[in-house]
Amino acid sequence: MFAQGNYKEMLKRIFILVVSCLVSAVAMAETNTAPVSSQAAASETRVSETPALGQAVEKQAGTDEPRTSWELGGDADDKKGDKVEVKKVPEKVVKTIKLQNLVPPIHFASGEAEIPEGYVQRLRDVLDSMKDKNNVRLHFVGHSDNAQLFREVKRKYGDNLTLSRERAGVTAEHFQKALHLPAESITYEGMGESRPIASNATEQGKALNRRVEVEVWYDEITERLVDKEVVVAEQMNRVKVCRVETVCKLRYKEGNSKRARIKNLVEPLHFDDDTASMPEDFIQKVRQALTNLGT
């Protein structure tokens, strides 16, 4: 009769021996089906080190390793990045239309403006009729006769050009307030004595020349196609690439037995002093290891 301690020790050794034989048999069966090239037959057996149990078998590719460029839909172009191309693009064209003589000129006498009665309402009616136009605005143009300036008028304005401009400015300010228009919709300028409409030889002709004309401006906006350089962004197609995984590669000399010993597929089984039974989870791990080797 064996002692109780010797009996347990013998069972442990038998169990470990059986598991090792099973693992070796499955590994040998797997490697028998693997093709062996002529180059592999001439080389020595090379076995990559298997990571220890629990160690990750995936890793990121090293910075010095060669890379392969992958793209979808077409050959790879050596010139990468955005490109500048000439294309037809729409462009806004703004044309200012200037309407004259919609209302009569405003005449001056003795250095003051004579605003005709009902003039404000006439301008208001003109603006109301142009609500469908873009950027409607009023432009006042001042004119003068050719009479020389003297005394106080000379000191104040200097010449007829400045005088005509000041008269146009005063008139523009008056109508801006009367019509409640924004400042940007009113402009003015002075032409001096350069554009008379009557002879300056008579007082009547000079009175006609001392005037402020009112022009109504608006913009016509259209579009046209023009050639223009535009930046075309490169269309890049991307695909997912899996991470690098370390695997074993076995090569054998011709004539040698095709055997391999693989460790750490299953965690070691530890026995308590008072038991020799095998846990069910350990048996499942052994079965799973055999299944993995068979795929």
Image: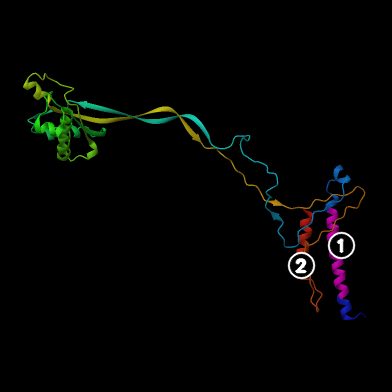
Q: Which residue is mark 2?
A: 282
273 or 249, nearer to the observer: 249
Q: Which residue is mark 1?
A: 21
Q: Position of residue 32 (x, y in %)?
A: 86, 50
**Residue type marked 2:** Phe
| Residue 55 highlighted magenta (yes or no) | no
For residue 216, side relative to residue 146 (left or right): right
Reading the chain from its start, which is encountered first: label 1 or label 2?
1
Q: Can you say which quadrant of the picture contains the N terminus?
A: bottom right
Q: Position of residue 92 (x, y in %)?
A: 36, 31
What range is drawn magenta here? 9-29
**Residue type marked 1:** Cys
**Residue at 49% over, 35% down:** 231
Q: Is residue 177 visible?
A: yes
**Residue at 84% over, 64% down:** 19
Residue 120 to residue 3: above or below: above
Q: Main secondary structure of the magenta part?
A: helix
- Give the secondary structure at mark 1: helix
| Residue 26 highlighted magenta (yes or no) | yes
